């Protein structure tokens, strides 16, 4: 579930807590979360160093380690971060625990063990190697880029929004929200949208992501006019009162309003 807005908040949390302190210990609770690196490699990359800064790209959080490789965190379906002092405050499902010289710890929490921790020499080559597209929110991803990508895509617009190789950061929940606010049926073909519709969709995408971050990525705090607080079987559309429908699109549970989001 962590999508771009959630990971942006993890970034801000990391920046506010874990930077510029000497790393003393690195503990891994389950090495299934390590990708392309061993606990020994991770330890020798981190211990004695400090975290110098962070960058977010899509659903990835990159942490710059002074004089070493970058730490790459991906939060899978359920990840979280927690900074705490007392050892008995260690949260459940901590998979990676980093101890600092000020006696605080940073836990990378992963109940379903679907996230991944790895190291990389730099952000750019990592994104290229893994064929991750431009970040959906950053200003260097323009409406012209978006129009070009969508015009060349025959798949459903929902699949295109969620395809991390086309643009990075949007998952199932925010794709549904963006399409609801843009009044587009989730099964609309991307290349059936004209330039104007794509410009609207692009603006809606940026607005949904920014507004979600402002509301702490917490559906309970989202405006009631949004779809996300109404993602359940009995819900009605906050705009028109029609029953919200659930279908499968791109293999995922998709919620939409059949009145506001007509298929073209
Ligand atoms: Zn409606």
Image: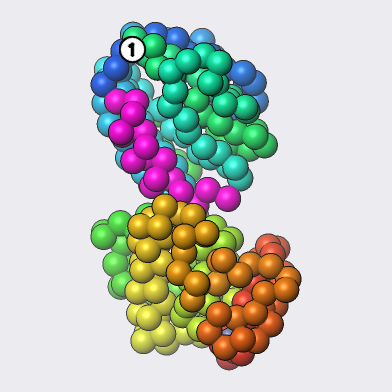
Q: Residues within 10 Å of mark 1 (few under 14, many from 20)?
A: few
Between 143 and 222, the one nearer to me in the picture = 222
In magenta, the rendered stretch is 1-19
Which residue in the structure is indicated by mark 1? 102
Q: Is residue 26 left or right of residue 47?
A: right
Callout 1: SS: loop
Q: Per the image, is 46 magenta?
A: no
Q: Nearer the viewer, residue 222 or 101?
A: 222
The x, y position of residue 141, in whole percent, is 31, 62
Instruction: Name the spot of residue 147 as percent of width and height, x first.
Output: 38, 75
Residue 136 appears in the picture as rendered: no
Locate the C terminus by quadrant: bottom right
Q: Residue drawn 33% across and 29% down?
A: 17
Q: Position of residue 213 (x, y in %)?
A: 38, 55
Identify the residue at horizontal 57%, vertical 62% (top origin): 173
* Residue nearer the viewer, 221 or 114: 221
Which color scheme did the rendering employ for the protein?
rainbow
The reply to whether residue 140 is in sight is yes
The quadrant of the picture showing ligand 1 is bottom right
Estimate the x, y position of residue 247 in percent, counting from the top left.
72, 73
Q: Main secondary structure of the magenta part?
A: helix
Q: Is residue 145 above or below residue 55?
A: below
Left or right placement of residue 30 versus residue 102 in this view: right
Residue plotted at (53% across, 84% down)? 239
Is 10 part of what is drawn in magenta?
A: yes
The relative height of residue 113 versus residue 264 in the rendered view (above or below) is above
Q: How many marks?
A: 1
Q: Measuring 64% from the left and 21% from the top, which residue is drawn there?
A: 30
């Amino acid at each position: 579930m962590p999508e771009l807005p959630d990971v942006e908040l993890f970034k801000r949390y990391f920046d506010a807590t874990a930077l510029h302190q000497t790393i003393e210990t690195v503990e891994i609770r389950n090495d299934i979360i390590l990708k392309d690196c061993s606990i020994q490699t991770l330890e020798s990359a981190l211990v004695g160093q400090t975290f110098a800064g962070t960058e977010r790209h899509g659903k990835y959080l990159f942490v710059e380690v002074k004089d070493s490789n970058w730490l790459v965190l991906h939060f899978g379906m359920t990840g979280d971060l927690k900074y705490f002092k007392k050892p008995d405050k260690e949260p459940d499902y901590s998979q990676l625990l980093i101890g600092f010289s000020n006696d605080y710890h940073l836990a990378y929490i992963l109940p379903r063990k679907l996230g991944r921790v790895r190291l990389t020499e730099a952000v750019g080559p990592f994104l290229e190697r893994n064929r991750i597209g431009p970040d959906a929110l950053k200003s260097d991803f323009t409406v012209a880029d978006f129009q070009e990508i969508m015009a060349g895509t025959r798949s459903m617009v929902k699949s295109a929004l969620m395809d991390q190789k086309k643009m990075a950061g949007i998952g199932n929940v925010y794709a549904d929200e963006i399409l609801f606010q843009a009044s587009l049926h989730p099964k609309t073909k991307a290349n059936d949208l004209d330039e104007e519709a794509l410009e609207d969709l692009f603006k809606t995408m940026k607005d949904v992501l920014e507004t979600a971050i402002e509301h702490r990525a917490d559906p309970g705090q989202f405006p009631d006019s949004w779809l996300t607080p109404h993602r359940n079987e009995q819900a009605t559309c906050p705009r028109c009162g029609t029953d919200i429908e659930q279908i499968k699109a791109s293999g995922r549970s998709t919620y939409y309003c059949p009145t506001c989001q007509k298929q073209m």
